[in-house]
Image: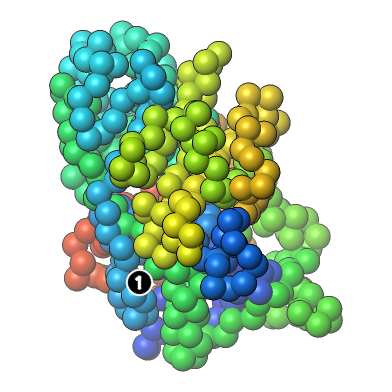
Amino acid sequence: RVVIIGGGAAGTAAAWALTQRDVDVDVEILECAPALGGVATTERIRDVSLDESASSSCVINDGVQGGATSYANTLALMRACDVAQPHWVNVKVSFGKGANNWKNTCESALIASLAKDVKKFKRTLRWISRFEVIYAFISVERALRMHGHSKEFRDRVVYATTALFFGTGNQTKNVSSVLLARVFNDDRLRLYEYDDERFMSSAPRMFAFPEFGTMYGNIGDAIVKRGGAVTVSARVTAVERGRRGARVTFIDASGAKRVRECNKVIFACNTEQSEAMLNAGSGTSFMERKIFRNIKYYDDVSVTHRDEAYMRRHYDVAEDGSDMYFIKTYDDDASKVEMSFDLTAYQPFAKGASGERVYQSIFLNAADEAAKWTKDDIDPGAVVLTKWWRQFGHTVRHFTRAVPFWRFVQNKRRTLYAGSYTLVNTHEIAVLSGFAAAHRCGAPYPFPDDDLAAHQFDTYLAINHGVKRRR
């Protein structure tokens, strides 16, 4: 019997894999929210220019913006659960404003002025790839400095691009340089073609997810149909682990205290929550505490709004509304960013009755950066949704003192860990981590005939669990 704590991308992937035919496992998801999906939710928002009726509102996907062609396991799982096909787009991005503006779809004065850096970057990537063992412990910032790249190129081009496409936020310069090289050089991972003249020569092909409410509803239905159990509105309070098994205590939707006895527990929630549950139960091991200490969390906030004046004040916005992603760098520290998205251009269902566009602006690291935020410049009357998020940071410590040590706690003390925090913050990594946890519980990898998906799974399993796939 396996209990999975958390019903987001990682938890549902693990449960679905464990309910495959011929897998002798009794599995149950315990999810604290009233629906599956974790941070990925579908929200109904009102049209600020009309009344409050349902006909004057629209829905948006929140928490996860989209995926890349390399999201092979995510796409395979969606197909297996009869989820609607995603909406594919060629992503157009506007970086910076005014003299510092550049776009991935046309030439710009900024990129032309950084021509030497752009050409040199190819050589830098080659060095990092050649000496990965060394560069794994060298941050992006230090590697770019070592190879003589200018501060303007680092801040306005490399950090901004990486922060946007790989979800590294304001910790981008602290990311392991090997990760940067992999996403540029690896045919299976990269989002776009590096161009030694324009840096990016194409609009990356990406997809917007179908409505998360329906998508995770389908996945949950598939889990239950195949014999698994899903319990929502279940707040886990303690986890005890012993020689004879594990014991999970939770409060159900009615407020009653419940207990599940099991053989293994998969923590598919963040490490702060996992640590609290374990400390309320039988405690943590030395190695678990070491890993938990080296994963740092930050408080971010997203504001969904219809304030086009704010967007034009802080970003270069195309008149035809074709730009989808926007990056703003701060004047006093260009390595730090704010991001905004035109959801109407990206998500096919994010369109209101009045025709007003729906934007979402992201503000990072409240503890250190809130004084820089332009959040208060957004017209309060145009705000339709505000959410706070607890996100882990892609720090050097994360990559050097947490990621390499997960293998020493996976499948130990009746416990497995699954979630994007085990590597990098993407939906695909979350799904991979769920499949890996299920694999360690006896489930076969579900997509062995998909070469890209299987390669990514094998790579993740080796990095995070230190084992090879059973064939």
- Decide: is 137 above or below 471: above
Say left or right for 31 vs 324: right
**At which x and y percent is residue 138?**
41, 23
**At which x and y percent is residue 385?**
63, 54
The part of the image, by quadrant, that contains residue 13 is bottom left
* Residue with the mark numbered 1: 77
The type of colouring in the image is rainbow
Q: Is residue 412 visible?
A: no
Q: Residues within 10 Å of mark 1 (few under 14, many from 20)?
A: some
**At which x and y percent is residue 86?**
32, 66
Say left or right for 389 vs 108: right
Q: Residue at x 21, y 10 (%)?
A: 116
Say left or right for 300 vs 204: right
Q: Nearer the viewer, residue 149 or 366?
A: 366
Kind of residue at disc 1: Leu
The C terminus - image quarter: bottom left
- Decide: is 386 above or below 395: below
The part of the image, by quadrant, that contains residue 348 is bottom left
Q: Is residue 277 visible?
A: yes
The N terminus - image quarter: bottom right
Q: Residue at x 36, y 15 (%)?
A: 99
Q: How many marks?
A: 1
- Decide: is 405 above or below 79: above
Q: Quick one: SS at disc 1?
A: helix
- Decide: is 42 above or below 49: below
Q: Nearer the viewer, residue 309 or 291?
A: 309
Say left or right for 295 vs 172: right
